[in-house]
Amino acid sequence: MEIKITNQNPSKSVLVENALKWKLFNEKIIAIILFQLLLGIVLVIVGVSGTQILFHNTNILPSFGIAFVLLAGMYFYQNQRYKKIFFEKTRKYAEYLKAQDAEIHITITNEMVTYEDSLLSQKIQWRLFTHYKLYHNYLFLIINEKNLSSIVIDKTMLNESEFSTLFKFLNQRLIEKK
């Protein structure tokens, strides 16, 4: 199997793909922050109301609750800082691609995925990919979720036969994450 994908207008697609990448990989983080915030609020309410649920002395619960709320706030602030940095780098990269009139080439074979643009050339063996996800008409071949490392393929750049072949291959090779 060999599938070649050429993106002739990568400056636009890089912005869209990275926005989706940020959203996809941050769903879990935002859920954790919200859980921590809600837990903190519940602890403050239970502690202030004096309700004895599990503890005989509920005086310490508001302190834990405030700590959870403050930690959630710090995590949210840090996440927003990372988001700003991520999108600033993405914007600069897109501007560079546009100025260079660059193309992105992705070649998928049974052995590896090759990614090439005017700055980077990578050959990635399949064993480095942990899973894949189909998200908003984009196929994410994920290497590492923590640092947003993945190869993103716009489904519309493949014909039906290529996508079907690739999808069957991925189902045999990688785990699909829902």
Image (spheres, rainbow, N blue to C red):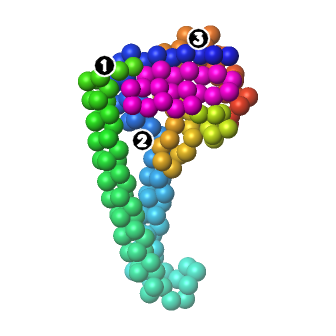
Residue at 31% x, 54% y is: 81
Q: Residue 13, percent across and down?
A: 38, 25
Secondary structure beneath label 1 = loop
Mark 2 crowdedness (10 Å alpha carbons): few <14, some 14-19, many ≥20: some
Residue at 27% x, 29% y is: 95
- The C terminus lies in quadrant: top right
On the image, numbered disc 3 is attached to which residue? Answer: 160
Residue nearer the viewer, 155 or 129: 129
Residue at 33% x, 37% y is: 90
What distance separates the C-alpha of mark 3 from that of mark 2?
Answer: 27 Å
Where is 106 relative to 122, above or below? above
Mark 3 crowdedness (10 Å alpha carbons): few <14, some 14-19, many ≥20: few
Of the residues shown, which amino acid type is indicated by label 1? Asp
Q: Can residue 72 be seen in this view?
A: yes
Left or right placement of residue 100 versus residue 62 in this view: left
Residue 132 highlighted magenta (yes or no): no
Residue at 55% x, 45% y is: 144
Secondary structure beneath label 3 = helix
Residue nearer the viewer, 169 or 55: 169
The range drawn in magenta is: 104-123
Left or right placement of residue 133 versus residue 29 in this view: right
Res. 28 mark = none
Q: Residue 115, percent across and down?
A: 51, 27
- The N terminus lies in quadrant: top right
Q: Which residue lies furthest to the bottom in this view?
A: 57
Where is 18 relative to 64, above or below? above
Name the main secondary structure of what is drawn in magenta: strand
Residue 117 highlighted magenta (yes or no): yes
On the image, numbered disc 2 is attached to which residue? Answer: 22
Of the residues shown, which amino acid type is indicated by label 2? Trp
